[in-house]
Image (spheres, rainbow, N blue to C red):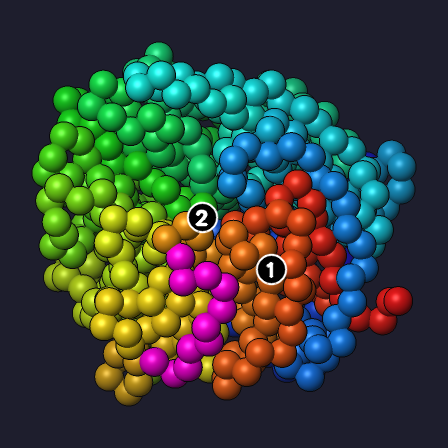
């Protein structure tokens, strides 16, 4: 692959994670990749098929390469970084590690040293809710990088879409552009928590609510934005843009897309007032590329409970099975569907966590096609004691049903830490556990613990990225880089 130009654009397109996952053989043995968006691709897989350096046998020898202070964050809003290889900048050519900070900054670090290459501040917005609580938010989501055009997309809390030059962090011509609808913008109660999903020239932006109350008008939505014309093409409101409030998209991955871009998948939060599962609230939704609703379904939940789908759906396909989907619900449920027949209902529902009133099962699952297993970070023991807090591996059988392969207790059996999506690469599952502020690695097949970071300087609410022999994870205001071969 040739280097990027000064504007940050590579002459030939990098192979995305989703495409690498379908390739094998000696030609891919030394492949290096970009990690341009949450989960590595628009499929939000969290799976790196090209990793060859870090394995169950080498991971125990990991060392800390560097630690850098990334900058201020808002509350526990901590975001997965992105990585872009060999970016030509005015100060040299670097593998750039991109950090977005809820305090209002996008920062590019040299992935080899942790030194800042550039940093761009984005003016925060103060959001005041009807109950009198007030928050200042800069950026609410992980960045998404348009590799072909060398630009970094983020949405600020004021409803503006920014496109920053990958090489310099300078705002590109014509940006920022307001993308939030007039009603939500006027109410100033919405917020954007999800990494935008880039498919060709279309950017899909999913929104949620910062103020959840009957006095705070908000309408969750998905926005289709054209990066060619710089305009909003379509919007999808789960509840319609009328009297019924709600329908937020809370998952950090926002919208997951089929590899061919034919369908989009999301999962929604509750509606207000009760019952909170009105219409398309608390549902998994299937959309076409222009945001027309194709199908929707959700489990029967307590109509007065705050039982959102707080996750982005996982798209996966075990050997011998049709394309499937799994989503996590705050009721403590892992809900599984056949993607070809969402409207026919779930094919399996597992009560893996004690949802109760705390509702911490809000992360995202990951899938390893080698082990044929789905991996889930579980914040609480299930009510029946079958599933424990920590990391679960659920393997698909010949009938495409998931059953427990192994589980490892890790972190706090808590009603404080939400589940964090795992990351999988080369037979290793990486899991960072919230308020316990540490990162651990497990053998994907056996569940054997193979490495732990020990305590970090701050909470680890975002999954790590594992790319080209390095592991990057954010702990509070700090970012850590681990790898082999340094003292």
The answer to whether residue 153 is seen in the rendering is yes
Residue 414, relative to residue 188: is it above or below? below
Give the image location of residue 337, x and y in percent: 24, 64
Query: What kind of element bears circle 2?
Result: loop
Give the image location of residue 388, x and y in percent: 37, 72
Front of the two marks 2 and 1:
1
State which quadrant residue 239 falls in.
Answer: top left
The answer to whether residue 463 is seen in the rendering is no
Q: Considering the image in quadrants, where does the C terminus appear? A: bottom right
Q: Residue at x 78, y 33 (%)?
A: 118
State which quadrant residue 21 falls in.
Answer: bottom right
Count neighbours of disc 1 (C-alpha within 10 A) and say few if under 14, some if 14 to 19, many if 20 or more. Answer: many
Give the image location of residue 252, x and y in percent: 45, 46
Q: Is residue 178 left or right of residue 296?
A: right
Q: Give whichever of 95, 103 is nearer the camera.
A: 103
Q: Are marks 2 and 1 in contact (CB under 8 Å)?
A: no
Residue that numbered label 1 is attached to: 438
Mark found first going from the N terminus, 2 or 1: 2
Q: Is residue 163 left or right of residue 301?
A: right
Q: Residue at x 10, y 38 (%)?
A: 275
Q: Give whichever of 5, 37 is nearer the camera.
A: 37
**Residue 232 falls inside the magenta stretch:** no
Q: Give whichever of 44, 113 is nearer the camera.
A: 113
Residue 20, relative to residue 445: is it above or below? above
Instruction: Report, in whole angstroms, how far the alpha carbon at label 2 lies from the one at label 1.
Output: 22 Å
Q: Is residue 122 left or right of residue 204?
A: right
Count neighbours of disc 2 (C-alpha within 10 A) and say few if under 14, some if 14 to 19, many if 20 or more. Answer: many
Q: Residue at x 39, y 83 (%)?
A: 405
In the image, which residues are magenta? 404-414
The circle on residue 253 is 2
Q: Is residue 317 left or right of residue 239?
A: right
């Amino acid at each position: 692959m040739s280097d990027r130009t000064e504007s940050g654009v590579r002459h030939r397109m990098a192979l995305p994670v989703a495409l690498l996952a379908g390739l094998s053989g000696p030609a891919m043995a030394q492949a290096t990749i970009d990690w341009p968006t949450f989960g590595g691709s628009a499929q939000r897989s969290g799976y790196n098929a090209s990793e060859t350096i870090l394995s169950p046998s080498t991971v125990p020898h990991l060392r800390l390469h560097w630690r850098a202070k990334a900058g201020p964050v808002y509350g526990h809003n901590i975001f997965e970084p992105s990585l872009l290889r060999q970016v030509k900048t005015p100060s040299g050519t670097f593998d750039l590690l991109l950090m977005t900070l809820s305090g209002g900054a996008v920062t590019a670090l040299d992935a080899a040293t942790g030194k800042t290459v550039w940093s761009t501040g984005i003016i925060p917005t103060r959001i005041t809710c009807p109950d009198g609580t007030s928050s200042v938010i800069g950026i609410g989501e992980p960045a998404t990088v348009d590799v072909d055009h060398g630009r970094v997309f983020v949405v600020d809390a004021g409803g503006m879409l920014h496109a920053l030059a990958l090489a310099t962090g300078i705002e590109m011509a014509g940006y920022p552009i307001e993308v939030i609808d007039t009603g939500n913008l006027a109410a100033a109660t919405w917020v954007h928590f999800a990494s935008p999903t880039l498919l060709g020239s279309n950017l899909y932006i999913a929104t949620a609510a910062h103020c959840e109350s009957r006095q705070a008008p908000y309408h969750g939505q998905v926005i289709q934005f054209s990066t060619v014309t710089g305009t909003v093409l379509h919007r999808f409101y789960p509840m319609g843009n009328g009297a019924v409030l709600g329908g937020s998209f809370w998952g950090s991955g926002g919208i997951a897309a089929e590899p061919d871009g034919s369908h989009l998948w999301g999962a929604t939060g509750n509606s207000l007032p009760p019952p909170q599962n009105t219409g398309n609230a608390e549902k998994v939704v299937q959309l076409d590329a222009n945001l027309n609703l194709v199908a929707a379904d959700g489990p029967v939940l307590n109509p007065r409970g705050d039982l959102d789908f707080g996750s982005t759906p996982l798209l996966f396909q075990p050997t011998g099975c049709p394309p499937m989907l799994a989503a996590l619900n705050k009721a403590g449920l892992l809900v599984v569907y056949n993607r070809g027949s969402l409207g026919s209902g779930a094919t399996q529902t597992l009560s893996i966590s004690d949802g109760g009133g705390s509702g911490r099962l809000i992360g995202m699952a990951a899938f390893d096609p080698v082990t044929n297993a789905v991996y889930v970070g579980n914040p609480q023991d299930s009510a029946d004691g079958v599933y424990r807090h920590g990391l679960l591996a659920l393997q698909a059988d010949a009938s495409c049903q998931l059953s427990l392969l192994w589980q490892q207790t890790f972190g706090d059996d808590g009603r404080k830490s939400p589940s964090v999506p795992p990351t999988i690469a080369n037979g290793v599952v990486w899991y960072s556990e919230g308020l316990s502020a540490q990162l651990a690695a497990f053998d994907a097949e056996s569940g054997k613990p193979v490495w732990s970071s020990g305590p970090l300087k701050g909470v680890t609410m975002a999954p790590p990225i594992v790319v080209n022999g390095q592991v990057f994870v954010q702990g509070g205001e700090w970012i850590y880089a681990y790898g082999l071969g340094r003292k």
